[in-house]
Image (cartoon, rainbow, N blue to C red):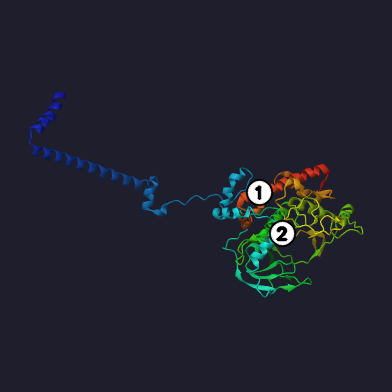
Amino acid sequence: MGKCGCFPLLKLVKTFRRSRLLKKAVIVASVCALYLVLVAGFSSRNAAGAAGAQEEHPGHTRGPALRKKDPEALPAAAPTRSNVVYITLKAKRLQAAGVGATVRPQLRRRQHAKTQTEPFTRDFLEREVNRTFADAVLPASQSHDVEVERVGTRDSVSSIRIYSQKPPPWLTPADVYAMRFLADAKVLRVGEVARGSLLVFSDGGAAPGRTQRGDAVCQGRCGLLLSSADSAEVLAFHLDRVLLLNRTLPTVCRTVAFARDSCVVQLWDTSPLSPVRLTWSQYQLSLKHSCWLQGHAPVLCSSVHHHEWSRLALFDFLLQIHRRLDPGCCGFRPQPQDECSPSGCVGERDLLLGHLHHRTEAPRQLIFTHNHGDFTRQLHNLDFRLLEGITQLPAAAVAVLRSGRLRERLLQSLFMDQTFWESRGGRAGIDSLIEVLERRAKALLSYMHTHGLTPTPM
């Protein structure tokens, strides 16, 4: 069987070797042509089979083939999670890039390099006001009101961002409305007011009227325009709300066409504000008498309720604002940039306290204005004189400080103001400010424990 099978093959090989060269070439060409015909037939048969299988089972085809045949047959992309940004305390340094992804990274780095050395001082404030507004807003005639081209935000998206169904619970709907109004309303007019600031008349406001003080008002549709050095006012507003004090006016950071840098706008309070005139000795006496605590008010009492001084002392200590309760800079070593009374601590008992106001229709309640906090003062130089005579502190605010959630709440609250967030360098810049407040909060809690201050519902 084996010899019979091999005989034809051997005979063909011997015949091929004995053949002439031309005959060999013809044989090789014939074999190659036969091979090509067989390969082509096999390929066409496989292609036909694949096409039939695709018609019978279209769902089993590969993605690229499907895209070439019928682009509309592609399934819709699966929806991602809702656009929510969660600010937590874990890996806060690494998370800055994640939160900062909502803003322009290059712009944030440039502003961070600029604002790191920007001090919260009164001298810088005055220079910034003169540089920003002297030539751009006020004409040579120094008229009372200046018409300004109608301008608004850079786009239709509000700079007050909320990434959940509700804002943080410490902000009321009125606060959120005021923040959005101040950040997004179009500017119509800018004028001077008696206090030396600039008043912003916004879109939709009524014609300015006059009060007995001579200040222009516009029925809740105006704001005080401040410089970028007043950005501490924005932080003070959010700190006030987080601590549930509710004594400051809504304040935001925004951009306007006639100013080169971002500015701070504070809601213009239409109700008249009256100053509270007290010397240091009168203030200490009012603390001892617990004025209006139970409806009791000796002759030496002012119109302010006793609990208001506790709120003010806690607020001013965290921000180290000395102009109200320590205008002579008697409780710390002042620096050249600190604004102190010319008389200093000489005759401090008769030194008049400053920047204390209340509404005319609510004389028992203080309104915190001029909240220019100092974030450069070190722990060994804190002004504890602000707490002198205080025996009680608001329990709700103390509970926030003791809970360790001050940073978390401030991050959530400040993140709403996108312009302020970017101007302070994003997450890294905001963290540096909150760290200062956290250290001062620990110092305050230690002082409370040492001196026996009592948290009291107010």
Q: Amino acid at mark 2?
A: Arg
Residue 439 shows up from this direction: yes
Quarter occupied by residue 15: top left
Determine the secondary structure under disc 2. Answer: helix
Task: Tell me which residue sits at (61%, 50%) in the image.
Answer: 427
Q: Nearer the viewer, residue 300 or 178?
A: 300
- Report if the CB atoms under discs 2 and 1 are less than 8 Å apart: no
Q: In the shown orientation, is residue 97 left or right of residue 343? A: left
Task: Tell me which residue sits at (77%, 46%) in the image.
Answer: 444
Quarter occupied by residue 324: bottom right
Determine the secondary structure under disc 1. Answer: helix
Where residue 296 sits: x, y (%)? 90, 56
Q: Amino acid at mark 1?
A: Ser
Where residue 112 sits: x, y (%)? 60, 53
Residue 171 shows up from this direction: no
Within 10 Å of disc 2 (Cα), the crowding (few <14, some 14-19, many 20+) is some
Q: Which residue is mark 2?
A: 122
Marks 2, 1: nearer the viewer:
2
- Name the disc covering residue 432, or none: 1
